[in-house]
Image (spheres, rainbow, N blue to C red):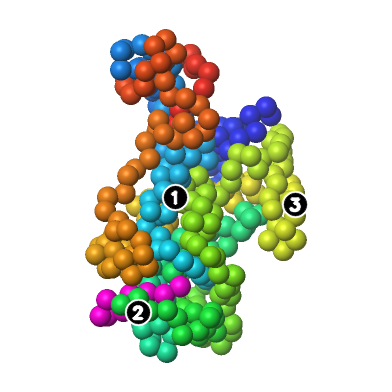
Amino acid sequence: MKNSTVQGFLQTSFAHYQKNHGLPLYQIKAAEQLMRCRTEALGGHSVYCEDGHLNGVWYNSCRHRSCPQCSALKSEQWQQRVEALLLKGKHHHWVFTLPHDLHNIWRFNRAFCQQLLFTSVRETIQKLSLDPRYLGATPGVILALHTWARNQTFHPHIHCVISHGGLGSTGEWQTPKRASFLPAKVMMMIFRGKYLAGIKKAIAADELVIPTNEREQGLLNLCNKLGRQDWVVYCAKPYEHGQGVAKYLARYIRGGAIKNSQLLHLGNEHIKLRYKSHQTQKTEYLRLTHAQFMQRFLSHIAIPKKSQYQMVGLYHGKCRRKLNQAREALGQIALNEVKVLDWQSFVNRQGEFVCCKQCGKTLNQLRPIEKGMNITEFSGSYVH
């Protein structure tokens, strides 16, 4: 196949896969959106300068969170907003991972388990941060959900970015009592207890869908077993500032689990992709059948109306006054309104100049083109 992209793969293989597999509606709708992205099915837009000179016509983007070909602007906008919030100084990066034995429950209760994972991590961080033995204050926290490992297998986990310090109840800046801030073992135990308690409560209230070939008592026994085992809470080396990890997270907030640049070959029966291994830190290669890759890709489609990230503590939208108190204590200016990156500035950052080819004035007018109209694309690429 010539079109070695996620869209090309879906256009070739999704209809056949759908006939042979029961899929949730949101995955079907997402695949349909991705297949129509930047095609005549979504219509298009023409771009004009302030004097009315036509400078190009392009098909519209689908704007789906899991689309790898139209999320660049949204990712950079998210990164810019986060970087504007960040407090000066060191930030910790922790990763909370669910045991493999709980994956089947997730597959049958995606929205519930996603929310429970966020809640368990958030409440664990809040509980320990307010403990005077560790900090006794409210830090700034960002939580970001990933459901995949680098080889695209199902691997739900949350990345946590937390400021090294927080604002105390009387408005003073507090620094952690420990160099590592919070103890990993204690974090793991509280996180584990909160997540398993949430599963048990849902079972008792008959609010959990029991997976096929499973029984309620079997799930309770599994929870009891996992409650005696260690879970993975990875504490990475602290960053001297938060920008690095914000940039890392921005790549995954939008655009889905697989980027087009990772697909090396789409054959009639197999696909080949590359990824950087966490274990070896080297580029490795994976060969999958169309069905195997489709199953992995669809399992990571973002759930509608469920956020992939949460801003907590001083970084929460309702804590702007406290955030500015903390910024003042750290010698930073107050944060008011965060300017949103516009598409013209984004294109300029990519090394292209957003100006009229005829008169040199700014391109600032977009006019819609009807759906289904076959348009000729000009050279260049503007992302809206």
Task: Give neighbour class at mark 1: few <14, some 14-19, many 20+ (Cα, 10 Å).
Answer: many
CA gap between label 2 and label 1 equals: 26 Å
Q: Nearer the viewer, residue 159 or 19?
A: 159
- State yes or no: residue 165 in magenta: yes
- State yes or no: residue 65 in magenta: no
- Along the horizontal axis of the image, is 330 left or right of 2? left
User: Percent x, y for residue 290?
Assistant: 66, 42
Q: In the rendered structure, which amino acid carries the disc numbered 2?
A: Ala
Task: Give neighbour class at mark 3: few <14, some 14-19, many 20+ (Cα, 10 Å).
Answer: few
Position of the C terminus by quadrant: top left
Q: Residue at x 41, y 44 (%)?
A: 77
Q: Quadrant of residue 314?
A: bottom left
First-in-chain label (2 vs 1) = 1
Q: Residue at x 42, y 79 (%)?
A: 175
User: Percent x, y for residue 87?
Assistant: 40, 63
Q: Nearer the viewer, residue 236 or 2?
A: 236
Q: In the rendered structure, which amino acid carries the disc numbered 1?
A: Gln
Position of the N terminus by quadrant: top right
Can the viewer see residue 82 in this picture? yes
Q: Residue at x 36, y 22 (%)?
A: 362
Establish if 70 lies above or below 208. Answer: above
Q: Which mark is residue 284?
A: 3
What residue would you read off at disc 2? Answer: 137
Q: In the rendered structure, which amino acid carries the disc numbered 3?
A: Glu
What residue would you read off at disc 1? Answer: 79
Number of the front mark, 2 or 3: 2
Number of marks in picture? 3
